[in-house]
Amino acid sequence: MQNELVARHFDEIADLLEIQGANAFRVRAYRNASRTIGDLPESIATLAEEGTKALTEIDGIGKDLAEKIVKLVETGAIPQLDELREQVPAGVRQMLLIPNIGPKKVGKLYEELGVQTLDDLKAACEAGRVAELKGFGKKTAQTILDGLEHVATAGQRFLLDVATHAAESIVDDLLTLKVVDRASVAGSCRRRKESCGDLDVLVTSSDSAAVMDFVAEHELVDDVLQRGDTKTRVRLNNGMEMDVRVVPDESYGAALQYFTGSKEHNIVVRRRAQERGLKLNEWGLFKGDELVAGKTEEEVYEALDLEWMPPEIRENRGEIELSEKDELPKLVEVSDIRGDLHMHTTATDGTASIEEMAEAAKSRGLQYIAITDHSKRVTMANGLDADRLRAHWEEIDKVNAKVKGIEILKGIECDILEDAKMDLDDDVLAEADWVIAVLHYGLKQPRKQIMKRLLTAVENPHVNVIGHPSGRLVGRRSPADIDYPALFAAAAEHGTMMEINAHPMRLDLDDVQTIAARDHGIPIVINTDAHAPTGLDLMTYGIDVARRAFLEKKHIANTKTWKQFQKLL
Ligand code: DGT
Ligand code: CA
Ligand code: CA
């Protein structure tokens, strides 16, 4: 379990306590714990395996918190959090998804207006009851109404890292059972989609009832919603739902193919079977009543004259044609990555020193990194002005000379201001080895102004890459309004790269935008934006995006060796 995910459990405790109007000190203790864990240089899960003692040595982690962390790492759940989730109605918890409305406000709405669902809340806004609440007003009521629309269209979906962790825990546990032979996650999680609506798990077993009993009693499972002979649907303790299906061994491949989807991919594959006088369903590929293929995905595809396709590309975006012609790309893998060009240190809002980040990158096999702290506009993160930045770069030079086996670039994550000026002057940017330009503020500006800002940055000769171009947060914050064809055309012309920010909450560029960027021949960089050493491990989610965009090693600039990368620069 990655630190990031452990941290989010404590944030959720803080949120729910705050909704309940708990003592501010208690709430703060959990918020601080969340930050401490998120920022920890070591893996919290590894520490927790040594027991509570190792954990209590961390500043701000007492015995009580330590016990909760151990429990979470061992079982995937914290009993207190489970209780809180039961106490606060699901509809009220969903209100936390409304942009710009925090737990304190949600608590007030719940306590004072008694709203329990998003519909209640909408009605209360429309009746003017929300605007009348102390501390709310007309503007906040409107923010809520706008936000409700956003929550309704997004539906209740879960970030890929949350989904992956739950699915892998349960699949791994199922595989330890004597009666279980094969087990796998399917659905959107296997396709590595940025968010998952629910989880789909497939199992082969000699004893279907035993599998379902095991799932029902699993620590991550809260309720059994439905149970049949071969299928059960359960709700996990984080609210996510999961289907577990027990399938016959000879159908496993066909079932895996079917339930991995996507629906759009399946429709084309099934039509292809029909064209060959065959019938494809989750039980197998049939000629009349005879099973032609079904045990493995490979044999199902092969029987349709197709090469097996990695799940990430099964979206009917041209993968079938490539497979048919034997021209599938060899998708990039996390082990191809040699550099990470976006990370923070204690100079701004990171928690580790330059040297600690460099050592952490080196131990993960990287050959080069860029230290890219914030520019001054980001006052919240103690952003750097020219003087502090130059002093910081001197430090980087020193560390670079000292730490062998890794190159450390002097970088900056420079804001593109609302008026389309860069936050730092050109003479400063000219001294950098690596400049990431980003939008942080004014994301809601009209397209024209957003494009003016992005194009100014793209055309600036000192800017190497546009970081997290849209500024969206998956399921939480809308992207800036960008004309991507115009952006990519300009980037291609000026030799500016595009980032896939690998943080599971960002994944920005997304998969579709990445395909377009590649078509423009723009070098793509996948970066973690790590704020602590363990943040470097999130690279894998950026790779997921790249793979969903059919990208190969050659499309990604930071797969190059240091020598090759220098040439590109
Ligand atoms: P999600 O859960 O919304 O993130 O997305 P998926 O792709 O996991 O969708 P889900 O859970 O509804 O169904 C899992 C897979 O089952 C889906 O990817 C393809 C297959 N499937 C479900 N319904 C249909 C259908 O009506 N037709 C076909 N061909 N396949 C389906
Ligand atoms: Ca699903
Ligand atoms: Ca499903």
Image: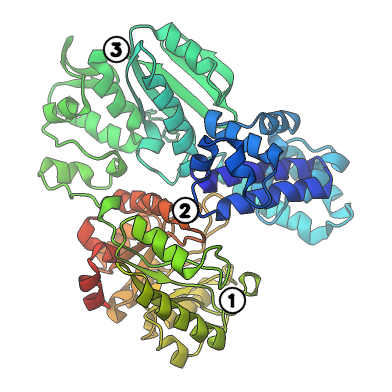
The residue to which callout 3 is attached is: 248
2 and 3 marks in contact (CB < 8 Å): no
Q: Quadrant of residue 320?
A: top left
Q: Which residue shows up at 48% across the image and 56% down it?
A: 506
For disc 2, the marked residue is: 534
Identify the residue at horizontal 24%, vertical 62% (top origin): 555
Q: Is residue 536 visible?
A: yes
Up-down: is 56 above or below 238?
below
Residue placed at 28% from the left, 44% from the top? 313
- Which is nearer the N-term, disc 2 or disc 1? 1
The residue indicated by pointer 1 is: 383
Is ligand 1 less than 8 Å from the beta carbon at label 3? no
**Residue type beneath disc 1:** Gly
Q: Say left or right for 208 vs 198.
A: left
Q: From the viewer's perspective, tell me whether residue 374 is left or right of residue 519.
A: right
Give the percent coordinates (x, y) of residue 534.
47, 53
